Amino acid sequence: MHELSLVTELVAECVQRAGGRQITTVEVRCPVGVDADELTEAFAHLTEGGLLAGAVLEIETVPQVLTCECGFAGEVDPEQCAGHMVVCPACSRVHEAPDALELIAVRFPDEDRIVP
């Protein structure tokens, strides 16, 4: 499951940035085509019992962007996205989507936010 590997990397990055402090909220951006429910489920599973236990994952969905060898560069419709695969709307070439999660911020109980 692609979402599990994305969340594994996200959790590791959050733990590193936390410096031993408890995290209450993690804000991310992810492109259309990534299953937000699977991200949330993986996040809940991977954060049990650690610094992120009980943390809320806030997901902002953004358009998938693709640059293809055929010359296409731009946003891709959701119908052309499936998990970590994206189909070029100009030439139908299948591409692996770029890293799908962008960490926006982590919040701690004693502070408003720390931006990465």
Image (cartoon, rainbow, N blue to C red):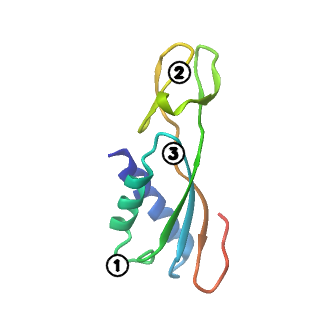
Disc 1 on helix, strand or loop?
loop
Q: Which residue is mark 3?
A: 100
Residue 27: give x, y in percent of width and height: 57, 63
Contact (Cβ within 8 Å) of mark 1 with mark 3: no
Badge 1 amino acid = Gly
Nearest to the observer: residue 54 or residue 99: 54
Q: Is residue 18 above or below residue 89?
A: below
| Count of marks overlaid on the render | 3
Picture layout, residue 34 above or below residue 27: above
Label 1 and label 2: CA atoms lie apart by 41 Å
- Neighbour class for label 1 at 10 Å: few (<14), some, many (≥20)? few
Image marks 3 and 2: residues in contact by CB distance under 8 Å: no
N-terminal-most mark, 1 or 2? 1
* Residue at (66% x, 82% y) in the render: 111
Q: Residue extending furthest bottom?
A: 110
Image point (37%, 45%), residue name: 2
Residues packed near mark 2 inside 10 Å, few (<14), some (14 to 19) or many (20 plus): many
* Amino acid type assigned to the residue bearing label 2 in the image: Cys
Query: Mark 1 highlights which residue?
Result: 49
**Residue denoted by label 2:** 88
Q: Residues within 10 Å of mark 3 (few under 14, many from 20)?
A: many
Tag 2 or tag 3, which sits nearer the N-term?
A: 2
Does 74 sit left or right of 25 as displayed? right
Whole-Å distance between the Cαs marked 3 and 2?
Answer: 17 Å
Task: From the top left corner, tell me how far across and down residue 84 is, in percent.
Answer: 43, 37
Viewer-proximal residue among 19 and 55: 55
Q: Which mark is residue 8?
A: none
